[in-house]
Amino acid sequence: MLLKEYRICMPLTVDEYKIGQLYMISKHSHEQSDRGEGVEVVQNEPFEDPHHGNGQFTEKRVYLNSKLPSWARAVVPKIFYVTEKAWNYYPYTITEYTCSFLPKFSIHIETKYEDNKGSNDRIFDNEAKDLEREVCFIDIACDEIPERYYKESEDPKHFKSEKTGRGQLREGWRDSHQPIMCSYKLVTVKFEVWGLQTRVEQFVHKVSDQKRFLSLGQGHCLYWQVRVHDVQTVGASNR
């Protein structure tokens, strides 16, 4: 088992982030539906938890064969999928990933959103107080994005909202920007197969690290929140 905690700050409030997140997820799913692969929604319905209250449960199948590294494609069936199960009690969510042909592989992600700049070191005390883990801060403005996924129009260093003035973030922006919120993600990867466990667990965290898709996804979320906010502002002013 490999456990890491990621902290991703955004120049938004927790309430504002929820809006951008919905658009980002929808747009990302559409963009990934290429080469006959994509996302299949299996279940999407309200869910009630005795501790967390009312929420939404979703189950999806994500087809990812073409995204695998060459060493993995050599041992993986041509058609396979990852099952994503998510319990959304925003501002708290649980997401679990399992693989169709690897019953001993799983990814468990607990996410909490707070209006601060990543300063809460005890946010997961109830879930993992006594478990040793690495804490990784992710900077959506300054961390490098793979060239094939980069879009200047969605780069927080370049775009700016005409209505709110947010955007064009510079190095050190987290120290002074208001508003600011943080997405705390506690990620647990398990692959209990002798000889492959360490390699696979490290690979999963590598492709999810601050230089890649976590930063990319949050940058997209900021971009879409700004776009939605601008559209809503214009619509309200025209009523």
Image (cartoon, rainbow, N blue to C red):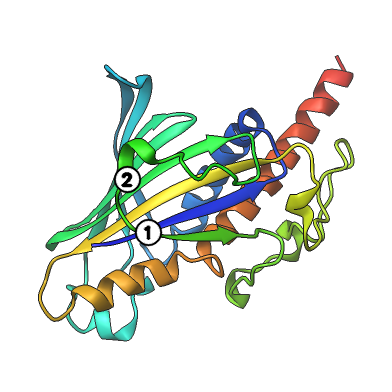
Nearest the eye: 133 or 145: 133
Label disc, if present, on residue 133 of the rendered structure = 1
Q: Position of residue 54 (x, y in %)?
A: 37, 17
Indicate the quadrant containing the N terminus: top left, top right, bottom left or bottom right.
Answer: bottom left
Please name the residue shown 47% across and 51% down the image: 29
Residue 104 appears in the figure: yes
Give the residue at the far top of this rendering: 239
Numbered tag placed on residue 128 in the rendering: 2
- Amino acid carrying mark 2 in the image: Ala
Instruction: Identify the residue shown where x is 80% and y is 56%.
Output: 169
Mark 2 and mark 1 in contact (Cβ < 8 Å)?
Answer: yes
Amino acid carrying label 1: it is Arg
Q: Which of marks 2 and 1 precedes in the sequence?
A: 2
Q: Which mark is residue 142?
A: none
Pinpoint residue 190: horizontal percent, then vertical percent: 22, 61
Vertical placement of residue 155 versus 162, above or below? below
| Label 2 Cα neighbours within 10 Å, binned few <14 / some 14-19 / many ≥20 | few
Residue 46 is drawn in which quadrant? top left
In the image: residue 13, left or right of residue 101: right
If the image is split into quadrants, where does the C terminus sit? top right
Q: Measuring from the top left, give residue 7's x and y in whole percent.
A: 54, 52
Lateral position of residue 30 relative to residue 42, left or right: right
At 58% from the left edge and 52% from the top edge, which residue is drawn?
8
Can residue 86 be seen at all in this image of the molecule?
A: no
- Percent x, y of residue 145: 61, 70
Say which element carries label 2. helix
- Neighbor class of circle 1 (other Cα within 10 Å; few <14, some 14-19, many 20+) is some
Query: What residue appears at the point 55 percent right and 48 percent down from the top-left corner?
Result: 27
Dividing the picture into quarters, in which one does residue 198 lie? bottom left
| Nearest to the observer: residue 116 or residue 192 | 116
Element marked by disc 1: loop
Q: Nearer the viewer, residue 196 or 18?
A: 196
